[in-house]
Amino acid sequence: MAAASPPSEPDGWLLDITESDDGRSVVLWTKERTSGRVHRTAVEYRPPFLVTGTRNDLSLLARRLADHADVESVRLGSGRPSLFDRRNRPVLSVVPSRNPARRALARSVDALGGYERFSLYDVDLGPPQLYHLAHDLYPFAPVVGRPPALRATEPPETIDYATPPLRIAPLEVRIAGERRGRIPPPDGRIGSVRLGEVTLEGPEEELLRALVDELARSDPDVLLTEGGDSFDLPWLYRRAATCGLSPAEFPLGRERVRFRPSRPARSFESYGRVLHRDAFYPLPGRFHIDRENSFLYRDAELAGLVDAARLSRLSLTTVVRQSPGTCFTAMEMAHALELGAHVPWKKNRPEGFRRADQLVAADRGGVIFLPPVGVHDHIDEFDFASLYPHIMVTKNLSAETLECRCCPESPVRAPGLGYRSCTRRVGLIPRTLAPLLRRRLAYKAAIKRPGVDPDEAVRLKRRVKMLKWILVTAFGYQGYRNARFGRIECHEAINAYARDLLARLVPEAERTGYSVVHGIVDSLWLRPNDVDRPPDPEAFARRMTERFGLPLGYEGRYRWIVFLPAVTHGLGVPNRYYGYYEHGEFKLRGIGARRHDTTVLVRRFEGEVLALFRAARDAEGVRALLPRALARADRFAEAVRSGSWPVEELLIAHRIGQAPEAFVTFTDSVAALRQLAEAGASRGAGEVVRYVLLDRRSRSFCDRVRPAELLEGNESYDAAAYLELLARSAETLLAPLGVDRNGLRARWGVPPAPERDPYHSPEDVHQSRLRAVGSDASY
Amino acid sequence: MGRTAPTYRQALEERMKRWDEFARLLTSPEERAAFEMVRTGARRYVAQATYVGSPDLLESLLLSVLTDLAVRVRSETSAPASRR
C-alpha cells in the first residue's frame, strides 16, 4: 500500500479490531481498496487501567502489585482521570500481563482497598475499543499506510462518507428431513447449507468441508442469518465436532476459533421486561449478523449500524448484538477520553439526601394530558424533534456541569427545582449529543434534497433511525443507576425543563387561536377555534421554535383522529389513538397493529377497518362508516366460527417472564412450553413462545394449545376464544363509536367468556391426591 | 420515577382502592352514580395535579374533583336548555 495517496483515495479500510487468542495483542482487519482482499495484522497491545487513591495507599499498592503474576508493570504518576477533577492527583497505572486478566486484577485491587480506598478507571473498556481511541481509528475508517501504522483519512464524525464495499452472504442451514422452524431431532444431520448463491448438499462431512472451501472462495465479509446465534452456528459446530473436524479444519471466520460460544445465552431484565439473549459465537475477521438477535438491525440495517460503529468505536459485531444504550455509553466514553478524562469503572456517586417533599417535587416525568375520548377532526399535531437531547445540549445538563462549584450564580436553573447548570465549560453529555443532533438534522435535510438518489435516501433513513434510538436512550441513561456518566438530578432537570416548556406552550397556542386537545411530553394536538379560518400551523411552529430555542415541528393535520378509552375507567388513555393525516398517512398508537403479540387475524381485521376509515373526510365520515365496519367484523366472526380460518394466522405470541419451571399456574404458555420441552426444545426466560389455542378450557397441556413449531396445519382451534379476541379488538378500535364487546358477543351469539375452574395451587392438588389415596393416610 | 416515590397517578389509583370501601355502603343508585362522578372528577385532572408536584395527595385530588364539579355546575347554569 502506498502511503502517499491523496486523502480522497484511501489505501483501504479498517474493518474491525478483535482480541487475539494470546491475550497480549489485538488483531487489525483491513480491507485493501484495489484488490478487496482482507489482511490480518496482529499488534502487541496491553492497555493499562488506572487507580486513584491517596499517595500512601497507591505506593503500598504499587509494591504489592509489583510481583503479582498477572501484572506486567505499574507506574505511579499524576493526572485528572475524573471529569470532576479540578487539579492533578496521584494515579497508578497498571498494565496486566494478559488482557483477559484485566477485570480479575481490577477486582482484586478494588478488594485490597476495601472497596472504598481506590477508584478505578478504564477497566471494562475492551482492548479493541481502547486501541481505536488511542490511535485515532474507528471501525470502517478509510485508512492510508501499512498496518499497524494506519492513519484515518477523515474523522469518524464525517457526515458524508463512503462505506467500504462489503461482500454480504446469507447463510442458512437445513437439517436433513426437517422443515426450517420445526424442532430438529437431537441427532439431526445437516442436509444442506446455503451460502450466498450456492447451495451445498451431500454427505455431512463432505458438505461441511465444502462449506469451508466455499467460504474461502467467495470470502464474504458479512454472514447474514435468521437465527444464526441460536440455530445455524451452534448446529454447524455441533455437527462439525461429531464428524471429527477440528477447529483448524472448520473456521467460519477468517481465523481459527473454538467451537464453543464466547458468551453463553442468558436471560436478563430491562425496563420491567424479561428478555433473552442468544449465545455469541465470534467469527474473527468476519461479521455475523443474526437478524433475529438484533434489535437494531431490524430498524437501522447495515447503513445505520456502520454509522453507530464508527461513532462508538465498537465493533460492528458488538453493535449488532447490543442495545442503543451500549452505543451511547461508548460514545460518551470516547468523548471523555478525548477530554483527557478516563472512564470510571464503578459510578461512585450515590444520590444526595433530601426531604420527602423535595423528592416528590423532583421525581416527576413530563406533562401528559388526558385526551378526550372520541372521534375528532381538524386537529393539528406538533412535535418537538429530539426534545430531551436538545434540552440537555441547550441547558448544558451533564453530571459534572450540574450544581458545579464554579458557577454559584448561574442563571440557567431547572424550573421549580433550581438545579444550576455550569456556564463556563460544556459538559460531556452535551458534547456527545450535539454532534449527533447535527448529524441527524443533516441526514434529514439530505433525504429531502431534490434529486437525491433513492438508494442513498434509504441509507440515510436507516442512519436517522439509528440516531433516533441512540438519542432516545441518552435521556433514559441519565436516570439509570449504573449508567457511567448518568446522574439522577440531570434526569429530573430535563423533565422539569420539558414540563415548563409545555406549560408555556399552552397559552401561546391559545393566543394563536388554537385550543389544546391533547399533549404528551413533547407533542401537542391542537384544534383551531375557528375551523374555517385556522391559524397557519407552519408559522406557529416557526414562531415557537424561535421563542423557546427548541425545534417545534408541524407533523400535519388529521382528517380525523380517534382517542381511545381505558377499559378500566373509560377515561382517555394518553398513548392509545389512531388517526389519518391529510397527507395520506396513518398514525397508530397502542392498538393491535403496534403490539408484537397480536394474531394475524386481529391485524387483518384492524387493517380492514382502517382501510375502510381511510375514505372518511372528517369525524362525521368515520361515524357514518360504523355500520360497514361492524359488517366487516361480522364477516370475520362468521369465518372464525366456521372453523376455516388458517391456524398459522391464529398464532399468539407470548414472551415468557420467567423460567418455565418457575410457573405456578397452568397458563396457555405453560401448556405450550411443556409440549416444546417434550419435543426437546426448551425455552428460557425472556424467550417468546407462539401457539394456537385449541381448547382454552382444557386442563390437559396437549389439548389446550399447539406451539407453532409443532403445528400440522389441520388442527381445529377454539373458535370461542378467537371470537373473544376479535370482539376485544373491535372494542379497542370502535369503543368511542359505542361498540363494546358484550354487545358484539350477543350479536355473534357467543356465550360470555366462561369462568375458569377456581385456581388450585400445586400444593392443593397434591393434598387432594393424598386424600384420594385413602382416608387412613396419616400426615 | 414511580419506584422510589409513587407517581401521582399511582398514588391516586391506590387511594381509589380505599374509596371502594366507601362506595360499598352507599345505598341508592343515585348515590352510587354521584360517587362515580366524583371518582371521574378525581381522575380527570391528573396532568395538572402532577404538574403541581405537591406532597399532599389529597390537596391535588380535591382540586381535581372540585374543578370537575365547577365545570359541570357552570355548564348546567349557563346553558340549561341545551342539556335537556
Image (spheres, coloured by chain):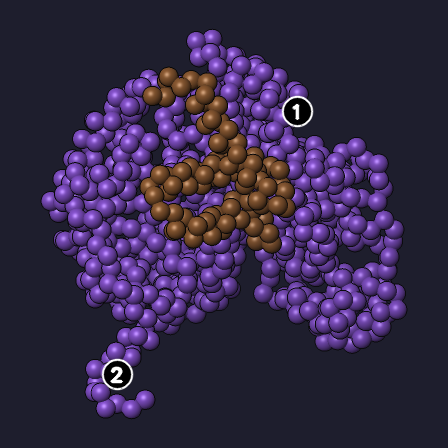
Chain colours: A purple, B brown
- Residue A500 placed where, x, y %? 64, 32
Determine which residue is flagged by label 1: A548
Asked if A433 appears above or below A334 in the picture, the reply is: above
The numbered mark at residue B38 is: none
Q: Earlier in the sequence, mark 1 or mark 2?
A: 1
**Subunit that carries the residue with mark 1:** A
Q: Amino acid at mark 2?
A: Leu
Percent across and percent down for residue A620 are 31, 19
Classify mark 1: helix, strand or loop.
Answer: helix
Determine which residue is flagged by label 2.
A770
Q: Residues within 10 Å of mark 1 (few under 14, many from 20)?
A: few
Q: Given the current orientation, which residue lies at the most extreme front position?
A: B27
Residue B35 in view of the camera: yes
Q: Chain of mark 2?
A: A
Residue A634, given in percent of the width and then of the height, sits at 17, 35
Horizontal arrangement in the rendering, residue A142 relative to residue A776 (left or right): right
Q: Residue at x 29, y 91 (%)?
A: A778
Q: Residues within 10 Å of mark 2 (few under 14, many from 20)?
A: some
Mark 1 vs mark 2: same chain?
yes
What type is the residue that disc 1 sits on? Phe
Residue in the image at 28% along x and 42% along y:
A728
Query: Which quarter of the figure is the C terminus of chain A placed in?
Result: bottom left
Residue that appears at 85% across and 49% down: A86
Judging from the image, what secondary structure is the residue with disc 2 in? Answer: helix
Above-or-below relation of A459 to A359: above
Q: Of residues A668 and B76, which is closer to you in this image?
A: B76
| Contact (Cβ within 8 Å) of mark 1 with mark 2 | no
Residue at 71% x, 40% y: name it: A417
Closer to the camera in the image, A750 or A246: A750
